[in-house]
Amino acid sequence: MSKMSDDKKDRDFAEERQIESIIGAEGAEVGHDHEPTSGGVTPGGRSVSEPAIASRTLWGDAWYRLRKNKLAVVALFWIALVIFCAVTADLWVPQLFGDPSEINSVTAMQTKLQSPSLVHPMGTDDFGRDIFGRVIYGARISLSVGILAVGFTVIIGLILGAFSGFYGRGTDAIIMRVADVFLAFPYILFAILLLAVIPQEARTTIWPVVFTIGFLGWPSIARVFRSSILSVKQNDYVDAGRALGANDARLMLRHIMPNAIAPIVVYATMSVGGAILTEAALSFLGIGVQPPTITWGRMIEEGRSFITSNPMLVFWPGLAILTTVLAFTLLGDGVRDALDVKMKD
Amino acid sequence: MLRFITRRLIQFIPVFFGVTLILFLMTTVLGDPIRLRFGERAANPEVYQQLRHDQGFDQPWYKQYADYIVKLAHGDLGVSVRTGRPVSDILKETYPYTMRLAFAAIIVEIFVGVGAGIISAVKKYSIWDVLVTLSTSILVAMPVFWLGMLLQIFFGILMKKWTNGAFYLPISGAESAQFGPIAHLILPAITLASVSTAYAARIMRSQLLEVLGQDYIRTAHAKGLSGGRVLYGHAMKNAMIPVVTFIGLDLGAMLAGAILTETVFNWPGVGYTIYLAIRALDYPIVFGGTVVILFAVMIVNLLVDISYAFLDPRIRYGGASE
């Protein structure tokens, strides 16, 4: 993109922000749904501009830009919806669609493998359980594994990346060589190996999968953070801080970190989708979260036996994975554009 | 050039030892090999101690690690718990299938991925470009095994129904008299290639767009060369370098990542063998298969790294200051 169009974009952006600050808080609230410029100036809205709107902080601006990105807003909305359904599942799924795990051997013969209907929006599986209800419960595992694993990755990656970038030399060399070793392993295989040595009984909770996926992802985060730190470290204000007597921890946490964190936010958002895919793959292979927990990956695996007669058993959980992962990717793209982070593809 | 290769080989050494050390730790220290290998039969403490001693697991770890390396060097990967066959024999039978699938997938990736990338770069912002961008985003977000099943459903089951059995593709990788080996390869190869094809198309597009914006391309146009000459004679040469590297590295990933695809299509390769071994709790096969795949991946990556230097003369100079 040329310099000129960038400048123009910035100008447009400044104008739009002015307009929004005139509209005031109310206008900003509905800004999720439609562009503030087309919203018109409401008569009573000429309030003093809210600090959140007139934000001059990196994050305030980024949030503003993110809201203007329609795809990102749709993605965010979808993620919020899935999270909401997953969190509140206990309150409405069993009541409306029946217990998603219970196998009622008396009625199963009549209720199994039904086509979608009003009672069962996605039909029923081979045990007469409602597929929609199971997909909702599966979202709990996928989302919590995805988010927790990435959280874990970010913690390890930030610490190691910080040491590597900040201290350089020997520390850097050792950490980066270890990262090379990790990256040499094909991801799925490494995960399988790690999970294979954990006893099966211990794998009925999500934690082994969370830690495995989280543990394997750190080299990428560490590399991104390291290079981010290397570029921030050269700024004069870091030298100034050091000259004023700030110690390493303070320099790192107060001066370098806030300026180096943006790529990590972008990378982490995108990684959630990847973690969800990995979790699904592990479940599909039978080495992920063990039964009776419902996971999307295992729903697909179980549906495989019915692929000729009832392909929909496989279709719905896969669609759930696809849309959720896609949402995180699009949100990640949106966050990247909003924070104006340049990343290699 | 020789210096570059030597340096790459030297860099390979710590990775080699790191990888083998991790494998060693996982197979012997973290996962109690006796328990994994003999299951409940090792529950009797006396038998357990005896087994530990027989297998040399009461030795200090560095000695065990050295033994492990020696065993690997001799191609000794242990024995299957279920069948008692040497793991290396099992892998020797299955690996050709994995390689065949990987090469077929690479061919798909080269033609479809590079082709789509070129179209979407040359016809930027056209309906084709939008279509390519959209489908690459969806492909990347799709679970590979699910895509495989969708293909099975569409080309195997629905097509058969619609054409009354006149035209459809086999959904299983197991060879049959009805279909030739090529027909069995089609769906698995597309499935395995899907994600990489999407990435290859994206990289091709962005590289070509970058190159097309450079001065020497404008010069070529100004000299009166046809659009095709400029594209294939001038732009592609430079734009292809990262794409070729990506595809090369991908071959390594495909030799490894085939586990999901092979499972969906019951393709009798290493990945499917590992999957069956996980199900049967036959851990020597799981670990042995992983070792073999790992080495295949590392060697392919090393070769790609080296061939990169041949492809792009600039890397030889830049290499020293890495």
Image (cartoon, rainbow, N blue to C red):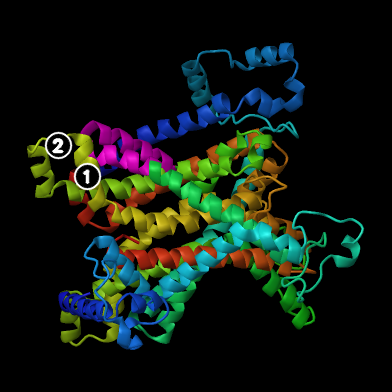
| Residue B209 picture location, percent across and down | 29, 74
In the image, is B74 to the left or to the right of A115?
A: left
Asked if residue A85 shows in the view, the reply is yes
| Region rendered in magenta | A156-184
- Chain to which mark 2 belongs: A
Residue B263, picture quadrant: bottom right
| Residue A126 picture location, percent across and down | 81, 61
Residues under labels 2 and 1: Cα distance? 10 Å
Of mark 2 and mark 1, the one earlier in the sequence is: 2
Label 2–label 1 contact, CB within 8 A: yes
| Residue B130 picture location, percent across and down | 42, 80
| Residue B71 picture location, percent across and down | 54, 25
Disc 1 target residue: A254
- Chain to which mark 1 belongs: A
Task: Please say if B193 is above or below A141.
Answer: below
- The question of residue A70 being in magenta is answered with no
Residue at image coords 28%, 85%: B227
What type of secondary structure mainly makes up the magenta span?
A: helix
Task: Please say if A238 is above or below A121.
Answer: above
